[in-house]
Every structure is written in structure tokens, then in C-alpha cells.
Image (cartoon, rainbow, N blue to C red):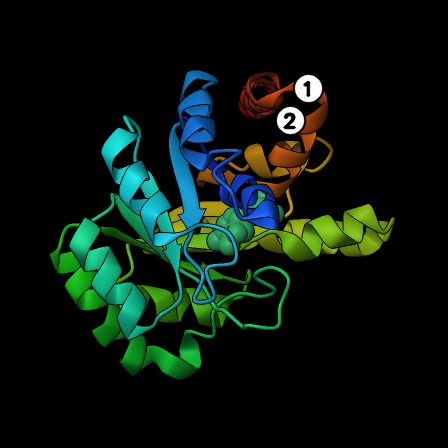
């Protein structure tokens, strides 16, 4: 039987709405508490270099109030490393970051930056954080992530979700196949496999069914759906679809 599948709810876009007016609401910490109640196994938050959504104070607050683990997404910069070492979240996920992008567009280029990244993640591992690397479903990147000492990889599901949303079925199928093959490949190397980016009610099930995938991180769709359903029912429905696919 497949191992249980965890749901990490990404609350970045609660902060996006708050920051549109610069005030105090909606409060990402309140969203995190509701997500916990709705069945989230963890909370994910990305502190971007430009602080466009999650703020330093949000990270501090999350570390104080959460009962479930925090997955702290960050770029591989000295500033972020210091913040992570100060808070020592359960997990850190290293993501590529470009100022001009709207969201994390691709996976991290690990193979070309192996040495630098190995040195970067070593202190985070030593501090007790589980280090995850956000990468495309690409053998070279998975092997490199394994060599630098990451415990976890998160596979970028964006290409699959984009192809699905645009009705490019053969491409969606090809991307899904790559995700399945690379989940198995990474698992066989001894890496824990997570996946995320762009997942919706329509795209989550096939990914949730891969037995090697242990965690999905989902944000933007859930926060959008919360406008119509409320946050708790929106998350509960995602949880139900994941559990059904797993069974
Ligand atoms: N996983 C990682 C590493 C991400 O960077 C993001 C987006 O911040 C997500 C998951 C969640 O993606 P989405 O908000 O599209 O569900």
C-alpha cells in the first residue's frame, strides 16, 4: 500500500491580497490556523527577496502559532540562509527566484551549481532542517540534488498543469509521464519526493496517485477557490481528492 500523502497548504496569496492594500487583513496566520483545522499536514510560505507577499513578521508569527510543520521556501541567498538558520523551520525548500517573474517559473538548476549549493545547504541540514530542492522532472537535476545532500526533492508540476489548462493533452500526458518516471527514479535513489505548483482539483489526482510522492504543496488555486467556497471547504475538497486518488 502507498504511504500516506501529506498536503502542504501554501498561504502566500493570502498575503498577496493583504499587501494589495498594505493593511493587516486578510491575515496569513489566521489562514494557516484554518488550513490546519481543514486537514493540512503542513504550511508552506515563500519569503521572496522583494517581500511581495509573505513578510519577515509572517514567518516569525508562523513559527510561533503553527502546530504543523512549516515548509519555508527560499532562494539560495545569504540573507535567506540567515533567516532560516534563525528560525530553524521543519523544512526549507530551495527555489529559483527571479525578480521579474510572476511566480516560480522553473526548477532550480542544481547540476550547474552543485558545489555552491552543497555548501549552501550544509548548515541548514546541520541546523536540523529537512532540505528540499525544487526541480524539474529531469534525471540530471535529481542526481545532482542527491549528490549535494538534499533529503527531499519537490518536482515542479507547472508544465503539466499549464499543458492541461491549455488543452494540450499530448503534452500534459508527456509531462505527467515524466513526473511519474522521475518520482520513481528519485525514490529509488533514496530521496523523499514532493510535488507542486499550479495544481487544481482537475489536475491533482494523477499526481496524488504516484505512490512515491509523499507530499503535495498547493497554494494559489486553493486561495482562489476559498473566495467561492471558504478556505476550510476548499482545502477539505482537495484533501478528499488526494485521499481518493491515493486509495
Ligand atoms: N511548491 C513550490 C516550491 C512553489 O514555489 C510553489 C509556489 O510558490 C508551490 C509549490 C505552490 O504553487 P501554487 O501556488 O501554484 O499551488
Q: Secondary structure at mark 2?
A: helix
- Look at the image and tell me whether residue 42 can be seen: yes
Residue 143 x %, y %: 39, 68
- Position of 135 with respect to 123 (left or right) is right
Q: Is residue 174 above or below residue 224?
A: below
Mark 1 nearby-residue class (10 Å; few <14, some 14–19, many ≥20): some
Among all residues in the image, which is located at the extreme left?
Answer: 126
Q: In which quadrant of the rendered view does residue 171 lie?
A: bottom right
Disc 1 C-beta below 8 A from ligand 1: no
Of residue 120 and residue 213, the one placed in the foreground of this image is: 120
- Residue at 29% x, 60% y is 150
Image quarter hosting the C terminus: top right
Mark 2 nearby-residue class (10 Å; few <14, some 14–19, many ≥20): some
Residue 157 x %, y %: 61, 51
Residue 133 x %, y %: 39, 60
Q: Is residue 90 above or below residue 118?
A: above
- Position of 73 with respect to 223 (left or right) is left
- Residue at 52% x, 58% y is 52
The alpha-carbon separation of the residues under discs 1 and 2 comes to: 5 Å
Q: Is residue 214 above or below residue 99?
A: above
Tag 1 and tag 2, C-beta contact below 8 Å: yes
- Residue at 40% x, 52% y is 55
Of residue 33 and residue 10, the one placed in the foreground of this image is: 33
For label 1, the residue is 229
For label 2, the residue is 226
Residue 20 x %, y %: 61, 49
- Look at the image and tell me whether residue 2 can be seen: no
Among all residues in the image, which is located at the extreme right?
Answer: 167
Q: Secondary structure at mark 1?
A: helix
Disc 2 C-beta below 8 A from ligand 1: no
Amino acid at each position: 500500500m502507498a504511504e500516506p500523502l501529506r498536503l502542504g497548504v501554501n498561504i502566500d496569496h493570502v498575503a498577496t491580497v493583504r499587501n494589495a492594500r498594505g493593511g493587516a487583513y486578510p491575515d496569513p496566520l489566521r489562514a494557516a490556523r484554518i488550513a490546519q483545522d481543514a486537514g493540512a499536514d503542513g504550511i508552506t510560505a515563500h519569503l521572496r527577496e522583494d517581500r511581495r507577499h509573505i513578510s519577515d513578521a509572517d514567518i516569525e508569527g508562523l513559527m510561533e502559532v503553527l502546530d504543523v510543520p512549516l515548509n519555508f521556501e527560499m532562494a539560495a541567498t545569504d540573507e535567506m540562509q540567515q533567516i532560516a538558520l534563525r528560525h530553524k523551520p521543519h523544512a526549507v525548500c530551495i527555489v529559483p527566484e527571479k525578480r521579474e517573474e510572476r511566480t516560480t517559473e522553473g526548477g532550480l538548476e542544481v547540476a550547474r551549481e552543485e558545489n555552491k549549493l552543497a555548501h549552501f545547504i550544509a548548515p541548514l541540514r546541520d541546523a536540523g532542517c529537512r532540505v528540499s530542492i525544487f526541480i524539474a522532472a529531469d534525471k540530471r537535476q535529481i542526481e545532482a540534488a542527491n549528490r549535494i545532500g538534499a533529503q527531499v526533492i519537490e518536482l515542479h508540476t507547472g508544465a503539466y498543469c499549464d499543458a492541461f489548462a491549455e488543452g494540450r493533452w499530448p503534452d500534459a500526458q508527456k509531462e505527467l509521464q515524466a513526473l511519474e518516471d522521475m518520482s520513481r527514479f528519485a525514490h529509488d535513489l533514496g530521496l523523499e519526493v514532493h510535488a507542486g505548483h499550479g495544481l487544481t482539483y482537475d489536475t491533482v489526482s494523477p499526481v496524488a496517485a504516484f505512490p512515491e510522492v509523499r507530499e503535495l504543496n498547493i497554494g494559489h488555486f486553493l486561495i482562489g477557490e476559498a473566495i467561492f467556497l471558504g478556505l476550510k471547504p476548499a482545502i477539505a475538497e482537495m484533501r478528499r481528492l488526494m485521499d481518493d486518488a491515493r486509495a
